[in-house]
Image (cartoon, rainbow, N blue to C red):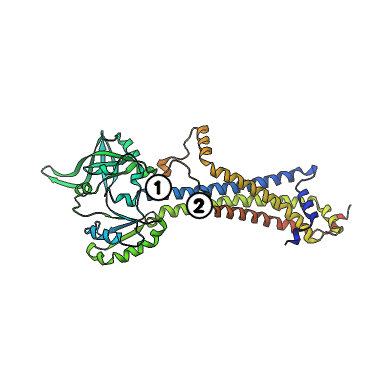
Amino acid sequence: MANMFANRYEWLIGLRYLRAKRTQHFISVITFLSMGGIALGVAALIVVLAVMTGFRETLQQQILGVTSHITVRSNVGEIRQFAKVLEVVDGAPGVSGAAPFIAGQAMMQAKGRPIGITLRGIDTQREKEVSDLEKNLVLGKLEQLSGFGVILGKNLAHNLGVALGEPVTLLVATANVTAMGTLPRMKRFTVVGIFNSGMYEYDSSLAYIHLPDAQALFRMNQTVTGIEVKTPDPEFALSIHKQLEQRLAPLAPAEGGFWVQNWMEMNHNFFRALRLEKATMFVILFLVVVVAAFNIVSSLIMSVMEKAQEIAILKTMGATTQGVMTIFIINGGIVGLTGTVAGLLLGLSLAHNLEPVLGLVERWFGIQILSGEVYYIDYLPSKVVLSDVVWITGVSLLISLLATLYPAWRAARIDPVDALRYE
């Protein structure tokens, strides 16, 4: 292969053939279209895969900022001896934090605006070990929860029209039996904090109260819904949750059995959909590069037809079949290489400056491309992974090289006698 590209004349002729004759400008146009098609395909692949990777990692960080890596629940709906369970979980290897919690649905009302929410009762000291709630607070402090305080998501507070220090009313389905009949439980809380997780869904529907207040509100006497567990790295949770199941086995009969889930299982369908979308987009945009490669084939075949007599003269002067093939492989390879490098530079530039470009497009057309209500986040994250770039570049160059083989073989088969018979 090294000798195949060693002769200088092959490179000179291969580069010269990139320019068509004056009467054959159409071939040059197809050549430039081929370069442009490959460049656009490579750039689109780099940008889309960078966005899909960034989107996944951003959502993972934000989800894990609100939820834990592992959740331990009882099959009967509540953990009765949660202090013992918490002690076992705390002592498990690989566990960096654990906290009890109560979760339930409620109706929150303020200033005549009722909104259905997800309510979580938390231990203010232990919650710091398993979530980023304290880091996400934009107003108030976590310690102020005790005494019927509530922390609201930013969008939830906006929708209710309440600010720090203002009252809200919570209604839960746990009933009070009175002389008037069965009525839902109702309690007034004071807004002591507002958090911003960056996830529209959480910021619009999640509220936190103190664990003892949640036990009183839901009538869960000394019981909790489950235990949140955090590990040093989210990936560790995939193996640690199996160990937790084994360590909790002795306590399982008294609690009706335990249900241990890691964050991937809790969001399995969501992350699976993201992987599927990434693979689908890769295939679709990969076809753009393939179509551009067909342009290389067509332009080289036309070039072979145009230069048949010149090829015949080269053969009569001593050019070998291998040498003729090399000329056209170089010719098509330069087109593929130029298009790939141009696409690589364009794709990396766009991927690293996606937010300013997107903001410019939104200002020009007066639209919001990403709405937090639909896409969970209201900005477009981007993360370029080296392995993706290497894979895209390698595949593009390989396709470009394969596209040159048939035209080069056609050129090598030209018979000098037939080509020069009528000259």
Mark 2: secondary structure: helix
Q: Which residue is mark 2?
A: 278
Q: Is residue 356 left or right of residue 304?
A: left
Q: Nearer the viewer, residue 222 or 17?
A: 222
Q: Is residue 337 left or right of residue 375?
A: right
- Furthest residue to the left? 179
Residue 304 higher or lower than 109, as above or below: below
Q: Nearer the viewer, residue 179 or 74?
A: 74
Q: Is residue 35 left or right of residue 109?
A: right
Circles 1 and 2 in contact, beta carbons < 8 Å: no
Tally the marks. 2
Q: Please report whichever mark, 1 or 2, sits nearer to the chain's N-terminal start.
A: 1
Q: Nearer the viewer, residue 85 or 102?
A: 85
Quarter of the image for residue 414 reads bottom right
Amino acid type assigned to the residue bearing label 2 in the image: Lys
- Taking the spot 71% from the left edge, 58% from the top edge, the residue there is 405
Q: Nearer the viewer, mark 1 or mark 2?
A: 1
Q: Residues within 10 Å of mark 2 (few under 14, many from 20)?
A: some
Residue 299 x, y percent position in the rendering? 72, 49
Mark 1: secondary structure: helix
Whether residue 107 appears in this view of the structure is no
Dot label at residue 238? none
Dot label at residue 62? 1
Residue 232 higher or lower than 249, as above or below: above
Residue 226 x, y percent position in the rendering? 28, 55
Residue 133 x, y percent position in the rendering? 33, 46
Quarter of the image for the N terminus: give it. Answer: bottom right
Quarter of the image for residue 40 reads top right
Amino acid type assigned to the residue bearing label 1 in the image: Gln
- Taking the spot 36% from the left edge, 60% from the top edge, the residue there is 94
